[in-house]
Image (tube, grey):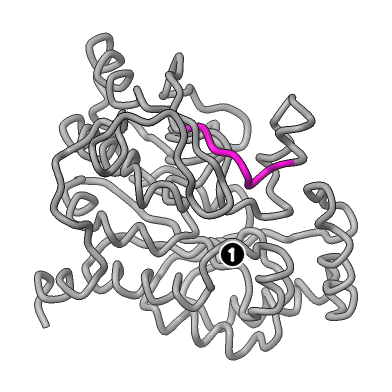
Amino acid sequence: MGPDEQLALLPMPSAQARTDGTSTPLGQPASEIQAGRAEATLVDARSILTPASGFMSEWDYTLNPYSGCGFGCNYCYAAFFSRDTSLRDSWGEWVKAKQNAVTLIRRACQRRSLIGKSIYMSSVTDPYQPVERKLKLTRSILEELIQHQPRLAIQTRSPLVARDVELIREFRTVQVNVTVTTDSEVVRRAFEPHCPTNSKRLVAVAGLTKLGIDTGITLTPLLPVDDAERFADDLAATGVRRFVVQPFHAGKGRFVRGTGAAAKQLAKEMKWDSERYQQVVEVLRRVLPSLVEGRDGFAPPA
């Protein structure tokens, strides 16, 4: 099967006029859009390309099309960036869509070229969270960035990224990282109940890899695992060559209000501690072609 035939098998967007994110999919102006349990509000951002720092300091810019995230993983570090306690406590129930993102990118490119600059999309949100299916904001950003050819990394835990594969293939330097956290649906439902199943993520990863897209799997964080050997085999079967892993510390980690008790109890029942984490990592290291721990796994594409 050739690349174009493989492309036809991946989920693709319906035919529609190109949008800059200022309208709903039906082309009607809207200030609020419901996507799953999250309510999305369209806002005008002051900036969209943020000079990278800290953990992402090797990059030139981070790009977050949204504030907040409809996936609302109960351990998400991004929730604790919210200065407003009510927003932090309602993490996963609100999203702010930066409707002027494309305009901001165009303005930035009038001042400086993005050609060859490294951009990480996204660092504190998921560009393919549920509301993206309706708004296509990330898609419109890709359409604009193609014209400027940065070195782009897309970080998501959603199979929806496969919708935009024909755009992704137009970048000369691009990598797609898909987060897969566990082999257990019981664990996923406890820690990230509003996310797609990990099996669906693996299917999407395998499809992108077959199309020749540089795709990685980020086991970040690695949540409790049922069967390390089987999990390693399932990961390897995707054809991915690049894997990154980071630990999750159930005792030290912070949880969104009202969600931590059940997740911590499950981790305790599964005896998920630093020793068990290292045991699983050793299995993964033996089976997978490449496994990098921590920050080194998030270097910009060459």
Seen in the image, is 289 located left or right of residue 239?
Answer: right
Q: 175 or 268, which lies in front? A: 268
Q: Amino acid at mark 1?
A: Leu
For the record, the magenta segment spans 90-96
Q: x, y percentage for residue 185? A: 64, 79
> Which residue is the extreme one toward the top?
111
Q: x, y percentage for residue 167? A: 19, 49
Seen in the image, is 290 located left or right of residue 260?
Answer: left
Q: Residue at x 38, y 69 (%)?
A: 205
Q: Quadrant of the C terminus?
A: top left
Mark 1, residue position: 219
Q: Quadrant of residue 89?
A: top right
Q: x, y percentage for residue 149? A: 21, 35
Query: Is residue 94 in the magenta section?
Result: yes
Seen in the image, is 187 located left or right of residue 56?
Answer: right
Q: Quadrant of residue 250?
A: bottom right
